[in-house]
Image (cartoon, rainbow, N blue to C red):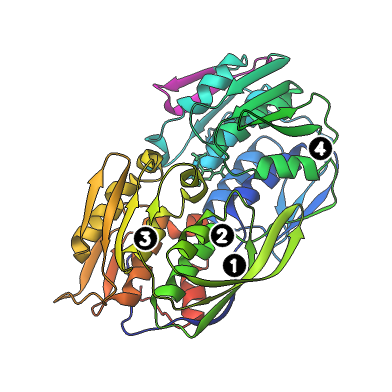
Amino acid sequence: MNLTTPINCQVKGTVQCPGDKSISQRVLMIGAFMNQDMKVDGFLHGEDPISTMNALNQIGAAITVNDNGSVQIPKRDFIFCNCDEPLDLGNSGTGLRLMLGFTSGLGLNLSFCGDESLSSRPMDRVLNPLTEMGADINSSNGKLPIKISSSKLTKKYSYELPVASAQVKSSILLAGLASGSVVEIIEPVQTRDHTERMLKNFGANIEIAKKDGKNIIRLGSSNHLSAKNYTVVGDISSAAFLIVAALISNSPGLEITNVGMNPSRTGVLRALEKMGANIEIKNQRLESGEPCADLEVKQSRLKGVELSGEIIPNIIDEIPIISIAAAFADGKTIICDASELRVKESDRLKAVSDGFETLGVKHQNFEDGMTIMGNPHTLQPEEPIFIESHGDHRIAMSFLIAGLRCSQSITVKDCKNIFTSFPNFIELISSIGYKLEK
Ligand code: S3P
C-alpha cells in the first residue's frame, strides 16, 4: 500500500490519541497471568498487540475482544499449554522479546517466528540473560527462528543491563513473574518503566531503588496480582506524529487528548520544547498508574538542537519524526548516541537519511546519529517525490507528515506496517484536514 500526501494543507481540530502499544502488549501478558477476570479499555487494536494476543491464545489464555473494543482477559484457572504451531509475533520486537521471557518462565516447549524484519533483529540481548536464568533456548545465531524447551529457572537472578532496553528489562521481569523467581535488574540508564508500574498497580512485590545513579529493580517471588479493570493511556509515540504535524503546518491549533505522560516517555516533548515548540499540557491525571494529559499544539518556529546521552532511550521511537521537525527548523540539529536505531524495525538512521536524500534535506550521517541542516522554508522540488518506507511504520508516518511542508506530493511506498502501531492513522489525520490518497 502506497500513500500520497495532498498539498497546501494545515491540521486543526481535536483528536484522541490511540492506545499505547507498549502498555497494550504488557497488559495482555500480565493480565493472562492474573488470578482474576480483567477488562481492558483503551487497548490498541494494532497488528503488534494483536499478534501478542494470538500468541497468548495459542498457549491457552482465551483472551477475547468485546463488541465495544474492550478486551476481556479471563482468570488463570488453567495451566498454560505447549503448542505445536510456532507463535508468530509478526513485526513486533516487544511481543517477541517479552513473550520469550514470559513463556521461558512458564516452562513451556514452544517455537517462535516473525516477519522478515523481526527475523533480522538481534534477540541474543534477551536470550543471553534468559539462558543464564536456566532457560533452554535454541536460536539461529541469536535470531529467529527460536525454540524454547521446558526448563526450570533459577530461584534467584541478578542482571545488569548492558544495553538501555525496556524490552530486555521486561523480558527478565516476566520470566521472574512466571517462574516465581526473585529477580534483580540493575538499570544504568532509565528506560520506559511500564512493566514496573503495571506490576505495582496490580499488587506485585516489586521495589525500585536508586544506587550510584542506577535503578535497582527487585521483583519478589510471591506475587498475587489482582485488578478488575485496566485502562490503557494513549501512545505518546503516536501522538508525536500529530504534534509535529501541527508544529510544521500552518496550524491554528491541534488538541490531542489522552496522551500518556510517563516521564520515561516524554523526552519527545522536552526535545521539541527545546526546539521552540508551543505545546500546552492540560488536564494532567493518572490512569491505571500511568500519568496522562491532553495537549494543545500550535504552529511554532523551530530551531536546531543537540540530542545525545540519557535522553536518547527516552526518545528512541520518536527520533525519525523529531528529524522531520529538525529538517524544518532554523539551524543545525545534532543527534548522537543513537546506534540502537540501526536495529529497529529498519535501520532507521539509514531510512531517514535515504528519505532526506530524496527530499533534498541537507544532512550528514555517522555511525550513531546524524546532523541535520534545517531550513524553515517549504520544500520546493520540481516534481512529485517518491520515498521508501523500508517497511517501517515510523519511517512511513514521518515522511507522510513531511508532506505538510512540501510544494509537491510525497508518495511513501509500502505503508502497510503503519497498521502495526497506528491502525487509524489515515482516518485520524484525514479528520484534522490532511487527507492521504491510497
Ligand atoms: C519498547 C521498548 C523500546 C522501543 C520499542 C518498545 C517496549 O525498545 O523502541 O518500540 O515496549 O519495551 P528497546 O527495548 O529495544 O529499546
Residue at horizontal 64 percent and vertical 51 percent from the top: 24
| Residue that protrudes farthest toward the front in the picture | 212
- Give the x, y percent position of residue 376: 29, 73
Mark 1 or 2, closer to the camera: 2
Horizontal side, residue 244 vs residue 62: left or right: left
Residue at horizontal 59 percent and vertical 64 percent from the top: 18
Question: On the image, numbered disc 3 is attached to which residue?
Answer: 396
Name the element at disc 2: helix
Question: What secondary structure prevails in the magenta region?
Answer: strand
Residues shaded magenta: 137-153
Q: Is residue 317 above or below residue 380?
A: above
Horizontal side, residue 144 vs residue 355: left or right: right
Q: Residues within 10 Å of mark 2 (few under 14, many from 20)?
A: many
Residue 163 in sight: yes
Q: Toward which corner of the image does residue 374 lie, by quadrant?
A: bottom left
Question: On the image, numbered disc 2 is attached to which residue?
Answer: 236
Q: How many marks?
A: 4
Q: Is residue 343 above or below residue 150?
A: below
